[in-house]
Image: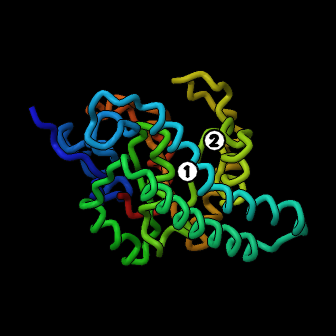
Amino acid sequence: GAEAPCGPSFRKLTCEPRGRGGLAPMADAAERRPLLDGKDAMAPPGGGCCPTWPCKAAFFAIFLACTLPAWIFAAFTDTCCNVPRTAAEHRRRARFLGHLMKTVWRSAFRLCCWIRIDGSGLAPLEQAGRTGRKVFIAANHSSFLDSPMICALAPSALIGDLKALMARIHFSMPIVGRLAKALGFMPVPFRSSDRGNFAVDKDKLAEVMARVDEHLANEGHLVLFPEGDLNRNWRQLLTFRAGGLEIAIRHDMEVW
């Protein structure tokens, strides 16, 4: 039978301190849809028996080429302009890099014409932050394309001040790590890299939470994968980790 169309869908959730309400229920399983249209994002247009490896090779080549300008900018400013910066200078650099990443990754998705994105559910997200409250984007995490897609599709008014919490191990990756540091992303100090092991170094986590509080106190916004891990089964959410949602409640943030 025909499959339902797939695409990003955002809904504003209520997130208030205990006593005034709580986090609104998540969408029904039928409404939890992946961001990509089709079972295999790397499949050639129209499906068929054509091998997918040319599409995969082209995808990685295109994304690497499009990400290179942002990486060069981050590397240049780290190496050649390695001078003490004020907090305002750090924010300006991260904002510029955020807008640059949004532009190049939107271009990458357009060039990868076999990846079909249905953005019909994005309209409500354009209203995020209009109330003056900080924005908390809680996204499902079904593939490694989630981060580039959020960056490419997030509202321009938010992208420069949108930071993420990500596993510390990703900061050691040559390209991803440098970009994450330049963007001001914050590492979650998991004790182990094993899937499903969420034990953290509490002392280092306290330092990270202090950075989160400082970021939110300076007109910042936050994006987080509450499941804490990749979940290939988009029909069934994993148990949410409490720490991320506690941040949203404590700072009275808009949750999307």
- Residue 128 on image: x %, y %: 37, 70
Q: What residue sits right under mark 1 in the picture?
A: 62
Kindly state the secondary structure of the residue where label 2 is placed.
strand
In the image, which is nearer the foreground, mark 2 or mark 1?
Answer: 1
Which three-letter amino acid code belongs to the residue tagged 1?
A: Ile
Q: Are marks 2 and 1 in contact (CB under 8 Å)?
A: no
Q: Is residue 37 above or below residue 191?
A: below
Residue at image coords 41%, 32%: 52
Looking at the image, how many numbered discs can be counted on the residues? 2
Q: What residue sits right under mark 2 in the picture?
A: 188
For residue 207, side relative to residue 2 (left or right): right
Q: Quadrant of residue 240?
A: top left
Q: Is residue 94 above or below residue 244?
A: below
Q: Is residue 54 above or below residue 153?
A: above
Mark 2, Cα crowd under 10 Å, few <14 / some 14-19 / many 20+, is many
Instruction: Mark yes or no: residue 227 visible.
Output: yes
For residue 175, side relative to residue 47 (left or right): right
Which three-letter amino acid code belongs to the residue tagged 2?
A: Val
Residue at image coords 58%, 62%: 101
